[in-house]
Amino acid sequence: MKCRTVATIALTGVLLTGTGVFGQEGPEPGSEGFMKPAGHHGGSRGGRRGRGGLPPDRMLRNRIGLSEEQLAQVNQLREDFKAIVEPLFEKGHAIRESLRTELESEAPFAETVGNLVIAGRDVRKQIRANHQNLRESFESTLTPEQAEKMDEFKERRGRHGFGRGHGRRGPPRGPGIF
């Protein structure tokens, strides 16, 4: 009986503590202390923006066998790509902010919203086209043997690309408590 009472009191304490924690309001989105959802990159992509999805130098050197001259060419391609797409990223961000502002207004103007959506789509198309140009330029720097190694590596890697990986490994976790 005593054990059951202690367990009931402990459970009540845990539940009340949880209610107090979860009942509190957190910081407003955009304010200091607000954590963005997982996968939301905001303005910075962890220092990786502008790399264009090309593999890191270490991988290119060790696994694909690029020479220092080829690596210099690849790095120049990356810099050129970054110079082209960085303004596009900024433009896309400005468009999204304008769209958010318009949608949050009292009476969003449908034509303005539509024009902003179309402008955002056009910017994404330009970025994709530049990614494709970067990939084609990169592939043109490879020898046939290196291209074959690259294809094998991409096949093994699957659709995840290069770098640290783009997803959780293991079984999916549910929203449960445990």
Image (cartoon, rainbow, N blue to C red):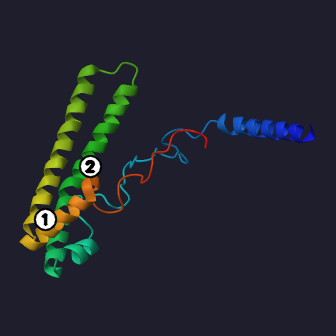
- The answer to whether residue 108 of the structure is visible from this angle is yes
Q: Position of residue 47 (x, y in %)?
A: 35, 61
Which residue sits at x=35%, y=55%? 45
Is residue 77 shown above or below 96?
A: below
Q: Which residue is mark 2?
A: 89
Can you tell which quarter of the image residue 160 is in? bottom left
Lateral position of residue 26 relative to residue 46, left or right: right
Tag in front: 1 or 2? 1
Amino acid type for the residue under numbered disc 2:
Phe
Q: Secondary structure at mark 1?
A: helix
Outermost residue to the top: 107
Check residue 112 in the rendering and tell me which mark sits there, or answer none. none
Quarter of the image with the C terminus in it: top right
Q: Which residue lies most toward the right here?
A: 2
- In the figure, is residue 159 to the left or right of 166? left
Q: How many marks?
A: 2
**Cα–Cα gap, marks 1 and 2:** 21 Å
Disc 2: CA contacts within 10 A as few (<14), some (14-19) or many (>=20): some
Could you tell me which residue is drawn at 17 percent across and 81 percent down? 68
Residue at the disc numbered 1: 138
Horizontal and vertical percent position of residue 125: 16, 43
Q: Amino acid at mark 1?
A: Phe
